[in-house]
Structure formats: structure tokens, C-alpha cells
Image: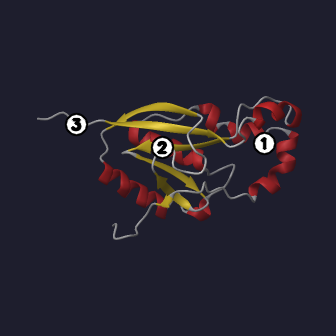
Amino acid sequence: MEPPHLYPVKLYVYDLSKGLARRLSPIMLGKQLEGIWHTSIVVHKDEFFFGSGGISSCPPGGTLLGPPDSVVDVGSTEVTEEIFLEYLSSLGESLFRGEAYNLFEHNCNTFSNEVAQFLTGRKIPSYITDLPSEVLSTPFGQALRPLLDSIQIQPPGGNTVGRQNGQS
């Protein structure tokens, strides 16, 4: 019997603030933040992410965000591309529809964490998933929450993933 093929799984990490969070967070929040993180999962030669437009994909580094600020090796998976795309399609129809997006509670990092666990059994780093509660634990974060809750983020440059173009 042939051993299963293993596919590498990477977490692409982007700082949406481009370094401003590191400089301004002590003044604005009273605590140090290293960045405002957007993440995606790279597997089967594509980058997959979630935003207000739902689940999207592009070639790695193919959004207008450009190359990632860092790449985390999440591990490897035996999940084939076909099974993975079926899984994403079902997520896109349930938990990760575009209208389910919420900057603090159901965002790109929630998606990356869910997908990383499905593929490898591992979570993404907690400094990323803990960021919303870090911001909201400050008076300034609480004051800005109504405004920030209205923000919909969809990195441009991806293609929506789902049951379209003859996929089933």
C-alpha cells in the first residue's frame, strides 16, 4: 500500500496597518499591538481567505495586499484538493457566508483557524486570534466598537470559492 501524499499547509499573515499599530497602539490603546492581522491559508497551490464577500481564493500573495509579512508553517495534510474544495464549499454555504462576516467575532482569522484545524489538527497562533479581545479590552476599543463593527473587509484580488462555474 502506497503511503498517503502529504500537502504543506501555510498560514500567510499580513499586517493591515503596515506597521502603524506597533507605533500608535501604546498611545491610542495603552497597550502594545504588533499589528492588525489578516490571515489566509495556503494549500494546494492557492491562497484561501474569508471576508465580507465570503470565501475567496487567489494564487499565493495574489491579493492587493501583496506578499505576506510572515509565513507560518502550520503542518501538512492528507486532505486532497477535491475533498478540501468540497469542504470549503460547504463552509461557504453555512458558517462562512459573506453576510456572517464580523470584524471582531467572525473574520478572516476565525476562518484560517477553522481551516487549519480541519487540515492539520492545529490552531493558528493565539497572538492572532486574541487580537479582537485585546483591542476591545481597552476604553478606546470599546468607544470605537460601533464604528469598527460596521467595517466590512474583503481583500481585493481573489475569486469567490463555492458552487459556481460547474462545481458541485
- Image quarter (top left, top right, bottom left or bottom right) of the C terminus: bottom left
**Front-most of residues 122 and 47:** 47
Residue assigned mark 2:
41
Residue assigned mark 3:
4
Q: Within the image, what quadrant is residue 24 found in? A: top right
- Image quarter (top left, top right, bottom left or bottom right) of the N terminus: top left
Q: Position of residue 149 (x, y in %)?
A: 75, 56
Badge 2 or badge 3: first in the primary sequence: 3
Q: Is residue 25 left or right of residue 1?
A: right
**Amino acid at dot 2:** Ile
Q: Position of residue 130 (x, y in %)?
A: 66, 36
Please, is residue 59 above or below residue 133 in the view? Answer: below
**Circle 3 Cα neighbour tier, 10 Å, few/some/many (<14 / 14–19 / ≥20):** few
Q: Residue at x 22, y 36 (%)?
A: 4
- Which of the two discs, 1 and 3, sits closer to the camera? 3
Q: How is the image coloured?
A: secondary structure
Residue assigned mark 1:
136
- Which of the two discs, 1 and 2, sits closer to the camera? 2
